[in-house]
Amino acid sequence: MKESCSMPDTKVTLDQIVSLSKRRGFIFQSSEIYGGLGACWDYGPLGVELKQNIKNCWWDFMVRSREDVVGIDGSILMHPEVWVASGHVAGFHDPLVDCRESKNRYRFDQMLAYRHPSRHDLPLFAFMEDNPSPAEAKIKKMAKGAGLEEFEVIPLPNIAEEDQARVIGPDATQPGTLTKPRQFNLMFKTHVGAVEETASVVYLRPETAQAIFVNFKNVQQTTRMKVPFGIAQIGKAFRNEIVTKAFIFRSREFEQMEMQFFIPPSEDEKWYEYWREVRMNYYVNQIGIPRDTLQWAPHPPDKLAHYAKAAADITFLYPMGWQEIEGIHNRGDFDLTQHSKHSGKDMSYRDPETNQTFTPKVIETSAGVDRSVLMALCSAYHEIEEVGEDHKRETRTVLKFHPNIAPVSVSVFPLSKKDELVDPSKRLENELRGDGLRTSFDVTGSIGKRYRRQDEIGTPFCITYDFDSIKDQSVTIRHRDTMEQERVAIDRVSEILRRKIREWSQA
RNA sequence: GCAGGAGUAGCUCAGCUGGUAGAGCUCCACGUUGCCAACGUGGUUGUCGCGGGUUCGAAUCCCGUCUCCUGCUCCA
């Protein structure tokens, strides 16, 4: 019997997750043999199972188990006008300026500058349109006798090329530290049709939500759903991120799990509260994330997105700190109103009971699939120090996945590779697979090595078929988290395992 | 985007001031063992991230480039 001591304080690093992901086939870098493509990742055989389980979990919870939510699967390419209506065309094309001195970045079109009309020996003092005071303070110090009232204010984009070198940035002390404005197109552009013409430009959607909004009427009328009800969707979205980050946390191609819940205008506070609670509980109970590694991050009113009335993020304690895993937003009626204006189509809803007509408001829950995968990996990762009888210390790496998301639920081993054990254990595996369990089978190496392999990919249960099994028709179930073993009859294995998985959350 | 660090076997990494690549683990086969990384024997694996330059000769020096990590910044 070995003693084990868990070390929950040992912080997992992103490097450990990246290394394990590659070693065991969870996640590979995209196009690796060509040197990789920035911030793009491929899911391997175990990774795709984990990801699929996470998506299925979400879909079952948000759609199939509820009467008031239905699903859609919208196309990635949409009419370009959709992104004008949604505000993305305007919001995603900001010209930006960097300051080499202060390391700040500014919206070029929001920058102004104080310029002296005649004194070319003086610098130009740039400032943001809502905050002129730092520039004014600098003028007092540096203007060599010229008073503030002598300066004229002009937009920075109107300043001549040759004067750019004299500009002092809003947070800089030296002139000439601002870069030239650069246009960032955060939406991926492509063309419909084989011939590239301006008229054929379309975008890869930067969020899945718009497919839901533009289909609001279609879905409502075909399903005869009554407000309040929700429309859910899982799908890919694309953003040409300037800064990618932290493995699969922020990539340019990613997958979202979104639900837009349509409600009467007066009920938005109530439903906003409701969905925040539902979504937080989901991570704890369905995915098995410890509550103390999850936290709310409300958006302060001045930082809200252009569409949002209120918003809060669920954040998870990743190796790189607290980061967003899901956003719950009160979008108001912004989206339906915008699409109604731009398309000219009526997007309002008539309540059959009150006969009132209104544009529904929307509560959005928007979660990142890839971020959830990373969260699952980070949260599950444990290194446990084992001390053997010979006092040799060794580290056991265990992914403590909730069985709902574990890529493999049960692995079956014959104790020896003799046919008399291999054949019946193989039959047992097939039987379990037939009962809907995700199974694997391993005959190679020692039994201990096989347990450790399964630990490392997070398989919650292993079953060993030994020489006694032939006589007593029983096998050993070995538990990943406790390493305990129990002897059970073969014809009850499937039922017992499925019960353990079902009751896992309550355990 | 800025600053710093790093890219050598599937993984972790060594390889000094230039002399045509190495360890541990993993993996595979056979034998042995028979419930927690066992042992023995044998075996597979590298365009030293990529491109160019210097040199008789480059993993090593120089230039460029790509990718990853960390911090800052940004984020619908």
Image: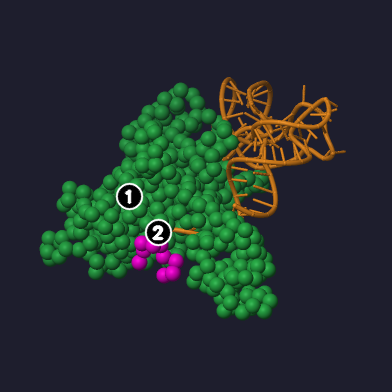
Question: Horizontally, is B73 left or right of A393 in the view?
Answer: left
Does residue A464 appear anywhere in the picture?
Answer: no
Quadrant of the frame with the C terminus of chain A? bottom left
Which tint is chain B?
orange
- The residue at the point 53 percent across, 29 percent down is A444
Q: Does A272 sit above or below residue A347? A: below
* Quadrant in the rendering for residue A160: bottom right
Viewer-nearest residue: A113 or A337: A113
Q: Assign the magenta stretch its main secondary structure.
A: loop
Q: Rounded to the nearest whole Å, what is the CA distance between mark 2 and mark 1?
A: 25 Å
Three-letter code for the amino acid on which mark 1 is drawn: Glu
Viewer-nearest residue: A252 or A5: A252
Disc number lying in front (2 or 1): 1
The residue labelled by disc 1 is: A81
- The residue at the point 66 percent across, 45 percent down is A392
Q: Secondary structure at mark 1?
A: helix
Magenta range is A300-309
Q: Earlier in the sequence, mark 2 or mark 1?
A: 1
Three-letter code for the amino acid on which mark 2 is drawn: Gly
